[in-house]
Amino acid sequence: MGKRLANWVFRFLKVSKLYNEVVEQDCNRNINSQIRGDLQRLLTSVNENNPFFVGKFSEFLQTNDTVSDDDFLRAYSKLPAFSKQDYANAGVSVMPAELGSKVNELELQFAGKPFQTLKRLRNGDFIMPMATGGSSSLPLKVHMPKHHMFSMLFTFFKCWYRMGWRPGEKILVFYPRNTYNIDDLAKFNKIGWLSGFRIQLFDKIDKDSIHSLVDELNSFRPKMLLVFPSPLNMIAETIRKHKLPLKHHPELINTSGETFFDCQRKNIASVFAESKVEDSYGSVELGEIAHETEGGLEVFSNVSYVETAPNENGKPEMVVTSLKMTEFPFIRYKMKDIADIEFRRSADGTERYVISNIEGKDSNYILSHSGERFYPSFFNSFVNDLNAVFDDSITEIKVFERGQKQLEVQFIVHAGSNQDEIADAARKILCEKMGAEMEYVIRFVDFIDHDYRRKYRVIERIGDVEYAGGIVGNREKIKSIGAESANDDITEKAEDTIREEGSRERSAT
């Protein structure tokens, strides 16, 4: 019944063709030629019709009309890149003028009325706002008409499709309350029992919320579970510790939105032994961009074009162009994420762009006493080295910046692990790699108490607070975390939060 209903909904909404183009089709031959064609069409359209981009690409299009694909892409890499600040300043001028003038009257409100909303979705007389947050606390409101919204939505379907899920098969979303547009979607999802799509929201990760999730997994028996990596790791840890009766292992578990450490993967696999766990990469603005494959994450080349360019620190910063979203186009958008991009061609002629060595935001590092930067990949290797000696005892790590004189490292370890030996070995490695001038505080905790309305980062720096899915800029959501406005002193609040969290956790040293 679920599959038939899903097919009927796609037909009713008149998005079956778009679903096929985004989800089922792939560029795996002559990728550069297809990307070049998509870029030319996109630039031609916005150069003529978009108030923000009008005229910006005239010379480029004329000069590179007949050059080779490789030369076209090389020239494209020299065009200006646009930051989040550029888009925030531009506002609705990034949209075609006829849409930008109607954003207020056409704003879509779910309001728990699924059938009325379905009619609006079918007719396309709506614009759905999606707010982003970010470590800069700069809100960016993206306005999405029908084609844009479904283009973005279907990038998530593409991840699940690659894993083996098909529309109508059971899927359970376990997400933090009051992030992204998840609360609105939960209200809208009153017909979820028909489609096999359920949303379970949580306020915090603890034994009660995880017990409730396990009950739902056992009764609903979804084929796929959608969850962030760190909550999933805490779910696995709590199931083991409290011997919760997990009777159903979802066949597929898709994670995204956070750095996924090797120790987390091993711990999760030890509990969800019958589940295939795969990671995805994306953003609030663009949807999903890439999905886990051998050696990295494969870019959806029919949806996005991803480059890198050296930033002010000499690190490869991702620059993304969305090929499907024409109403609020992201063209050479600077993601502020650090990663390597590789073009690979297999012996059979298959071509792929692969994102490897993702570090996350370039602000996400620890600055040592000597001024050297240590990114998440360092701490992933750090834990791997310890686990190689201590039989995979460490299941989670959290690193807190305490200035360039002190670093606090929190571990969650298996019961019975020798904490004193692990702490001594950890300090030794940190002294060798980061310098003996810093003080290294090693703590062992039962639970890392994190407010999941904020992005979970393995490294938590003072003043670098990213709210998940646009809490910043949304006054109602801001009130829920105790801020008075989007422009409050984020640094002070971050320091207070870190101090409060640190005081709650048990020190074993």
Image: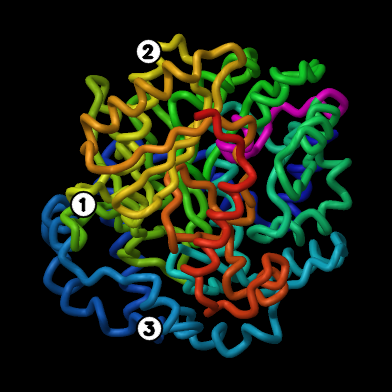
Q: Is residue 369 left or right of residue 89?
A: left
* Label 2 element class: helix
Residues in magenta, as a range? 218-233
Density class for disc 2 (Cα within 10 Å; few <14, some 14-19, many ≥20) is few
| Above or below: residue 147 compared with residue 432 | below
Q: Which residue is mark 1?
A: 315
* Label 3 element class: loop
Task: Identify the image quadrant of residue 55.
Answer: bottom left
Query: Can residue 38 be seen?
Result: no
Q: Residue at x 64, y 18 (%)?
A: 272
Mark positioned earlier in the residue sequence (2 or 1)? 1
Asked whether 176 or 189 is in front, the reply is: 176
Q: Which residue is mark 3?
A: 52
* Label 1 element class: loop
Q: Which residue is mark 2?
A: 388
Residue 229 lies in magenta, yes or no?
Answer: yes
Density class for disc 3 (Cα within 10 Å; few <14, some 14-19, many ≥20) is many
Looking at the image, do the residues carrying marks 2 and 1 touch, with CB atoms under 8 Å apart? no
| Above or below: residue 248 compared with residue 437 | above
Task: Identify the image quadrant of residue 301.
Answer: top left
Mark 3 and mark 2: Cα distance apart in space: 53 Å
Q: Nearer the viewer, mark 2 or mark 1?
A: 2
